[in-house]
Image (cartoon, rainbow, N blue to C red):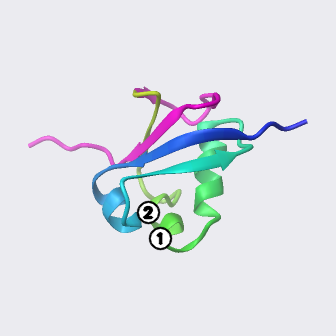
Amino acid sequence: MNTSLTLTLRYFASIREALGQGSEPWTTEAPTLGALRDELIARGGAYAEALSRQRPVRLALNQDLSDESAALVPGAEVAFFPPVTGG
């Protein structure tokens, strides 16, 4: 039996600009960060473009950089942001 999780999604830099918001509440049954990303891509439109698998996107779970296999937990904060480049 799947259990829905309520999360806070946060978007930074170009992803925030593309989506027109910095954060939103989200309810999902996705078990991992990668599955959550795919779910958001499936929304289509700006989500599909900003979070596309062809784009490098970094993910953080509760403010810790994480890979897409990280398990989601109730109440988690998930952040999506483009890679930071130095100069």
For disc 1, the marked residue is 46
Q: Position of residue 45 (x, y in %)?
A: 53, 74
Cα separation between marks 2 and 1 = 6 Å
Q: Quadrant of the N terminus?
A: top right
Within the image, what quadrant is residue 42 found in? bottom right
- Dominant secondary structure of the residues highlighted in magenta in the image: loop
85 is within the stretch colored magenta: yes
- Residue type indicated by callout 2: Ala
SS category of the residue bearing label 1: helix
State the residue at coordinates (65%, 55%).
Answer: 39
Residue drawn at (54%, 48%) of the image = 25
Q: Farthest bottom residue?
A: 45
Q: Nearer the viewer, residue 62 or 75?
A: 75
Compared to residue 7, the image places residue 14 above or below, namely below
- Tell me if 41 is positioned left or right of 50 in this view: right
Q: Nearer the viewer, residue 56 or 47?
A: 47
Q: Residue 11's x, y, as percent? A: 39, 50
- Residue 72 place in picture, x, y as percent: 63, 31
Residue where numbered disc 2 is placed:
50
